Amino acid sequence: MNGYAGKILQVNLTHRKIATIPTSKYEQWIGGHGMGSAIFFDLVKDKTIDGFDPANVVTLMTSPLSGTLTPAGAARTEVQGIGVQSVPIGWFTRSNFGGRFSSMLKYAGWDGIVIEGQADEPVWLDIRNDTVTIRNCSDLSLWGTDTWECQKKIWEYVAGNQLYGDWMEPAGKLGGQTTQRPAVLTIGPAGENLSRIACMIHDAGSGAGQGGFGAVWGSKRLKAVSVIGTGSIRVNNPKGLLQARLWQKKNYAFNLDHLKRRFLSVDFQSPPTPGTMYRQGKPSTGKRPQACIGCHSGCRGRYEDGLGNEATCFATIFYLFADTLDVQRKACDLLNRYGLNAAEMLWGELYLRDLHRADILGPGKEIDCPLKFENYGKFEFAEQLVKMIAYRNDGLGKTHPFGDDLAEGFVRAAKKWGRLDGDNGDLKTGRLLFPFWGLPRHKEARSQLDWAYGTILGDRDINEHGFDQLRSNPTYNKRWKIPLYGSAEEVVKIYTDKMVPFQGDMRMLDFSAENMYSEHIAKLVTWHRYYTRFWKQSAQFCDWRWPDFLNLYAPNKVGSTGIAEPKFLNAVTGGNFSFLDGIELGKKIWNLDHAIWTLQGRHRDIVHFADYYYSQPSFSLSGHPEYMPGRENGKWQYIQTLGRHFDKDKFEEFKTRFYHQQGWDTNTGYPTAGTLKSLGLNSVAVELEQNGKLGKG
Amino acid sequence: MIISTMNDINQKMTSGTDKRVSRRYFLRVAGTVAIGVGVGGYTAVKEALPKIIKLADGRSGIPVSGGYLLVDVKKCQGCMSCMLACSLVNEGVENLSLSRIQVIQNSFDKWPDDVTIEPCRQCVDPACVNACAQEALKADARFGNVRRVVDVEKCIGCGACVEECPYTPSRPIMVPAENHGGDLKARKCELCANAPYHWDPLGGGPGGKQACVEVCPVGAIQFATEVPEQEGESGYKVNLRDSTWSALGYPRR
């Protein structure tokens, strides 16, 4: 099996047993998310269990592309299982992280890891090629360490008396040699103490943030997984893979001698630029871009002062009103070290600030809060906040229920404080910016409809940037005079021409208010669900670099998506898998996921945004208008999209359109036998029927 | 001037019918010029003077490589694409351990100490070649240049070349050879000259394309024909950052 190690590691922590699953059993799913969902479906008999139940299964899956020369497609690891973050139900969900972990797992001879059960004491997993050992944390005093300290301790342990930088034999004399450090995925104190907003961290800043998987590992008493591999990944067509890489580089990647843009963009053509968004700008200290393995364009940085190494995106926005840039960078590091979800922390911290400024929250106030707001802006404030959530106390070492409240996540905390009650509840006014499933906002989704619908019809903030340039480019053009990629009509045509099997329907990208609930937008959401479920989350092309719709380096600006993805996959596997094959497999995976959510309790009646999304106008944090393509008076333009909200009745109509398009029961949202069987998901239909959850039609 | 003289020597090796340079010729030319440029420079060359290397036809000569890989450790983005490309074109698989160029990094360290790149230096005085009692490591002028290649048939997998390489990590590596029953055979960077999975019809080597150079997304690896300063690392670890790089916000220093 070219591109595969051939086996999946199955670890039962309860019985401390190691087993293997032949990858061929799940090969039809290609890799990543598809494999993870199928394994989860097979192994978790009762899908209604809580995420903290020892029977919950967490999968870490690679793809055939992991560890290969595929640009921005070699480094992701897909994490799945029942999460503990969302409300009212902890959905079967996913997270994902980059770095070196998935490649190292493949080099060690494993296509994935399946984690079951609950250890009787804290443990970590030591993988050195085929040798897998469940070790007690007590031997290295790992439990209680932060994520960076934990990794360093494991590195030291695996090295033994050998030195990194020289050839070493981590698996013994017959186990091959490497110069590399083990790739370690670990939880911090937040995960150990079961905070529902705990994440997992690998290296300095690769994080799997969503779902609260840090806490799920904490409940399993699993501190870390370390893997070092010295083996090979077989490639069907080595020359073809290298030629594809150079073709992609020559025609679609940034050209340092002829840069079209100097700033980071979330697409293939972006030059390597750290994706930091610190309020006071980029650090002026010496730095390099830092890329995941195989990536052509790093989106992180490492710095001369070591602050904020590898940090990106939400982590770098946290503590927005820190006094100085360096305080914000240090606060960012706190999130990675203690292992907390950066998005939840960003919006949660601002919520606390708001309540404090309104004289609602503070020592002895309506909400008794031990945070020392006199330190606001200083590092000490961020440290106290992070620690109080990580340790469930007052952040200074003393017991206090406030830390407990926040560790449950900000929506649960607000509910406990009574802040969600009545007509002026914080999710009705929009004071608490958590619009979907109790999860924090990301993009202004009342504008970016792919984001809104994809999230509410799914399980988590989709965090999929495939269409984000449609907003950012025209918006920054208006604001900072950055050149447009093209006219609205030109850009929309380039994008929609690639959206097989719906290609050519340009109104899929008409973001006008009149088109918000249309059949066209339903097709956009459908295509996006299928594309990402397969090409991003199963084949594991990176979200920040794919799809390559519009590319300023390419002839006529037509990017490589549609051609490139299968070119790389087939060069590695030797298959003859088309882009459309991937979209169709994405449909199957999406249906499998939806079936699991249905078994968990999903019904169309609970598929709703937070109330404020139906009453409060959309806005940007900067206060500046945002623009997206749309039709106005019959013409394509970049139209201003802020200031609008969803209509509840029309959203109901949209759901009906979407469910109909999926072939699901429009009354309940349940999958139907006909649809599932047409996708080869017969056993899924049987399980739904046994549970009274099979849709009619 | 020393470097240019070395290149003169290289020219002798790569042009005309006589592709070899005798030790005597090398000493005469290098020595003469070295005296002219001062003691410090001479010392560097003197210490780098190669021992006699037996060529394929049994004659002795002192070939220098037709090319060298120069790297910029401050520019490298740590993606390890060079390593993936190296193992792919040379072994047909993806395996960091089989890469002739090694990128080693620590994500918790500070720039620029967080990354190092260690390519084969194609030493003027190659300890690996000198260590090989089997003459498996030798010069080969097939491509109109000189360099050191591994004759897999002769290699007995003793590892002497690995042991004697004075650099860390050692640049020669031992690889299980599929067509030799999995026996360990020595491999080292040949600038892709003998890469069995080379993508380009014209192939690699000093006159062709090197996978790591071609693949590196940020231009942190450069092919050069001039002999780098042999003492220390400065000849190989160079500054490849230009104004475009600094326009992206990265230091040129």
Image: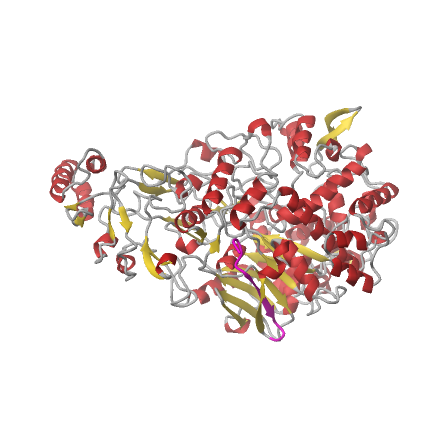
Q: Is residue B51 left or right of residue A518?
A: left
Residue A596 lies in quadrant: bottom right
- Image position of A487 with respect to A384: above or below: above
> Which of the colour schemes (rainbow, by chain, secondary structure, one colour) is used?
secondary structure
Q: Is residue A225 left or right of residue B183?
A: right
Classify the position of the C terminus of chain B by image quarter: top left
| Image coordinates for residue A37, horizontal then vertical, percent | 67, 58
Q: Is residue A622 left or right of residue A65?
A: right
Classify the position of the N terminus of chain B by image quarter: top left
- Magenta residues, dominant SS class: loop
Can residue A316 be spotted in the picture? yes
| Image coordinates for residue B61, horizontal then vertical, percent | 16, 45
Viewer-nearest residue: A330 or A664: A664
- Image position of A571 with respect to A363: above or below: above
Q: Is residue B240 magenta?
A: no
| Image coordinates for residue A559, horizontal then vertical, percent | 59, 34
Residue occupying the point 77% across, 64% down: A48
Q: What number of labels is visible?
A: 0
Viewer-nearest residue: A436 or A566: A566
Viewer-nearest residue: A240 or A303: A240
Residue B16 lies in quadrant: top left
Can residue A87 be spotted in the picture? no
Viewer-nearest residue: A196 or A658: A658
Q: Is residue A9 magenta?
A: yes
Magenta region, residue range: A1-15
